Image (cartoon, rainbow, N blue to C red):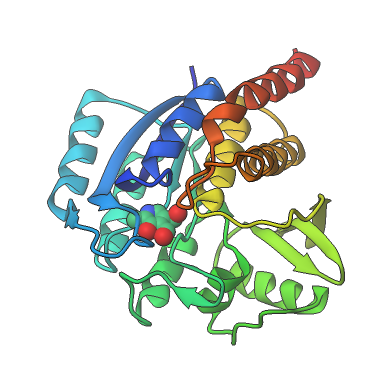
Amino acid sequence: MKRIATIQDISCLGKCSLTVALPIISATGVEAAIIPTAVLSTHTMFSGFTCKDLDDQIIPIAEHWKKEGFEFDAFYTGYLANAAQVDKVISVINSLKTDKTKIIIDPAMADNGKMYPAFDSDFPKEMAKLCSIADIVLPNITEACFLTGTEYRETYDLDFAKEVMKKLADNGAKTVVLTGAAFDGKYGVLWYESETDMFRMYEQERLDASFHGTGDIFSSAFTGSLIRGLSFESSVAIAAEYTAECIRITKNTPDANWYGVDFERAISYLVERIESDQMLLD
Ligand code: PXL
């Protein structure tokens, strides 16, 4: 079985980071090992959240894995507790990666033009260091702007998106996947492969709702699908449609929680998409 090591926080309640990455990666038929970066009572959109960083556990967990001889098909990183964790995560990846290991970085730190509450304006510079070693980086437009020192624009056109994505590739990431790309009346996922200098877009219907945690849902479904063995294009399509399905279901639920989507009720949709794409490959 393929194995992903995912490095992000445990928000004990809030349907984001590890509480969604674990079930979603499992649903894609891939083993998920974890290095938790912090334990929070909730995600940081709640007021009064508690947070205990696990700075002193990151390296020891990796050293034990190394001693045991574990190998990983991918490292997939998300929310880190602080800027100092970047160097630790880079050293974990460098110590455990092999020729086949994909490095997938979701620079979870900002949305809608604003940094998440726990981070200051110096954080993007550190996160950019982590993105520089990525095979695939998965930012939203706010993160892409902040990582590249580009002024954030609430509305933008394709040329602007391309410029920011190329800057991220110049920083070292081999492929840049812009999630929630919205320009010129189009909506979907836009990606840039530096090796071929090609942009591609997966277009989808823009849903009139936005929920917290959908970036983590997209990244987890994409990473799981890709490591399961599906093509890049199929992995983007499955992750985009699964995320949209989660939003649709949640929108239609009268007592839905504000803090996250009901991704659980679309798990069967995800499994069926993965199995049918896998069958085409077998
Ligand atoms: O969904 C990204 C995320 C992950 N972890 C924590 C967060 C957030 C976004 O706010 O606060 C703790």
Q: Is residue 77 above or below residue 185?
A: above
Q: Is residue 106 left or right of residue 218?
A: left
- Is 201 above or below relative to 74? below
- Place of residue 59 in the rendered image (x, y in percent of width and height, measured from the top left): 19, 47
Compared with residue 272, is residue 60 higher up or lower down, i.e. above or below?
A: below
**Position of residue 91 in the picture relative to residue 71 (left or right):** left
Q: Is residue 98 visible?
A: no
Q: Quadrant of the C terminus?
A: top right
Q: Nearer the viewer, residue 160 or 243?
A: 243
Q: Residue at the left extreme?
A: 56
- Residue 253 lies, with reference to residue 114, above or below; the image says above
Relative side of 214 to 19, left or right:
right
Residue 271 location (% of width, % of height)? 63, 21
The residue lying furthest to the right in this view is 185
Decide if residue 202 is in sight here. yes
User: Which residue: 40% across, 40% down?
Assistant: 97
